[in-house]
Image (cartoon, rainbow, N blue to C red):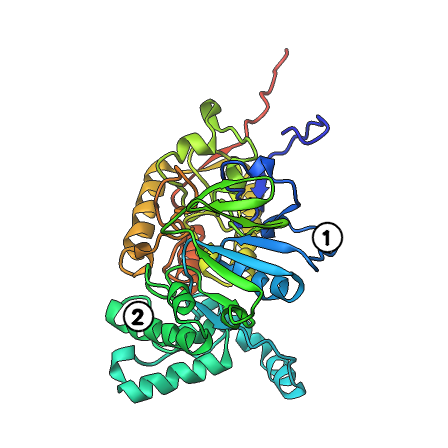
Amino acid sequence: MTISGGKTVEAKFVVLATGCLSNARKPDIKGLENFKGPVYHTGNWPHEPVDFTGLRVGLIGTGSSGIQSAPIIAEQAKHLTVFQRTANFSIPARNATLTDEERDAFRNNYSEIRRFAREVARNGIYAEQPDRGALDDSEDDRHARYGARWDRGGLTFMYAYNNLGLDLAANDTAADYVRGKITEIVKDASTAKLLQPNSHPIGTKRICIDTDYFATFNRPNVSLVDIKTNPIEEITANAVRVAGADHEVDALVMATGFDAMTGSVARIGIRGRGGRTPNQKWAEGPKTYLGLMSAGFPNLFIITGPGSPSVLSNMIVSIEQHVDWIADCLLHMRKQGLATMEADGGAEDKWVAHVNEVAHGTLYPQANSWYMGANIPGKPRIFMPYIGGVGVYRRICDEVAGKGYEGFVMTRAEQPRRVVTG
């Protein structure tokens, strides 16, 4: 492989630990190159502090990073204009200092917590598991349960019931609760209505967590512009033009997300057998076996690649599992004198079909999310992560290894020929 500076490095195996959300997407908006002020992307934020004091700031995007950025920018800026294409569900983070009792509880039970995250929890997060569906409770009990989760804060809001990702009627009860909270918080009725998500079931896009996001729109220096009905027409030297109106800004913040899961792999310029690139092979959607390897690319491993739990899980748990599995595999190959390893095409096809079958048994594909590649123009619409759960996935990977790495093709190193003279 060739790295920056033209240096060439040779390796028998390559492990891509390039990250699932590391290729920031800069939107293709007419006139962006003509803007005279500073332009920031939340995925490539400067290491030095950025001060928006006294500036009119335009924030484009209301996904996770936009939702977390808006309150902080609003505290500094003369005025913040938030350009929203898709309203998103967000739950209060409720960040707080851990008490000594909470710290001790984790330390004293650490090994069990880790085991639970790896083997039991569906997404690798340590939390109590729900024991009933949303419609099993009365309306009052359900409201109280959601209220307790809202007050606690964090991603475990979706753990209130065990069927929120499976049953639309159940999901609607959670979505309605959050929409109701937005109405309570945001004083202007028209703004509250715009902020209420209605295009997807709650949780089918990665649910956001925030600190005072919705309350930020009660500030006199914050305004919301709907760009779903009227998309951005152009960016001029000092404004964002929407529906013929120029919203003047001194700085722009792009919270426009990432080319998730496949983008960081595709941008490297990898070539497999026959000179084929991942982009060429994945033209109709990423194809891997277990999310670990892709047929046609021997000795190339992917950490948390498409087809593995990846972004639907506690990433630390999933990364550790892949690192351990790959390390064990390389030791096996060394002991057996094996030189190459590659996903079998048939096994890969079966795994891709399984990943899609499991996904379509849930509500997740109903959202135009980056899980589906929907935030990148021209990217194939296919549900990329494996939603079957980290514990199930770990057992599948261990079974594959236990059967001599079933579904992978391995070849031995060529032995040097003995020359006999006499």
What residue sits right under mark 1 in the picture? Answer: 47
Work out which quarter of the rendered image holds the C terminus and state it: top right
x 49%, y 70%: residue: 214
The amino acid type, in three-letter code, at marker 2 is Asn
In depth, the one of 279 and 204 nearer the eye is 204
What residue sits right under mark 2 in the picture? Answer: 171
Label 2: few (<14), some or many (≥20) within 10 Å? many
Residue 245 drawn above or below residue 298: below
Residue 411 drawn above or below residue 56: above
Label 1: few (<14), some or many (≥20) within 10 Å? few
x 51%, y 28%: residue: 271
x 43%, y 52%: residue: 308
Q: CA distance from mark 1 to mark 2?
A: 40 Å
Q: Is residue 69 visible?
A: yes
* Residue 216, position as x, y percentages in the image: 54, 69
Please, which residue is most extreme toward the top here?
Answer: 422
In depth, the one of 229 and 178 nearer the eye is 229
Label 2 SS? helix
Residue 111 drawn above or below residue 345: below
Q: Quadrant of residue 399?
A: bottom left
- Of callouts 1 and 2, the N-terminal one: 1
* Residue 365, position as x, y percentages in the image: 31, 54
Label 1 SS? loop
* Residue 327, position as x, y percentages in the image: 58, 50
Drawn side of residue 349 relative to residue 415, left or right:
left
In depth, the one of 21 and 36 nearer the eye is 36
Q: Is residue 24 visible?
A: no
The amino acid type, in three-letter code, at marker 1 is His
* Residue 204, position as x, y percentages in the image: 37, 61
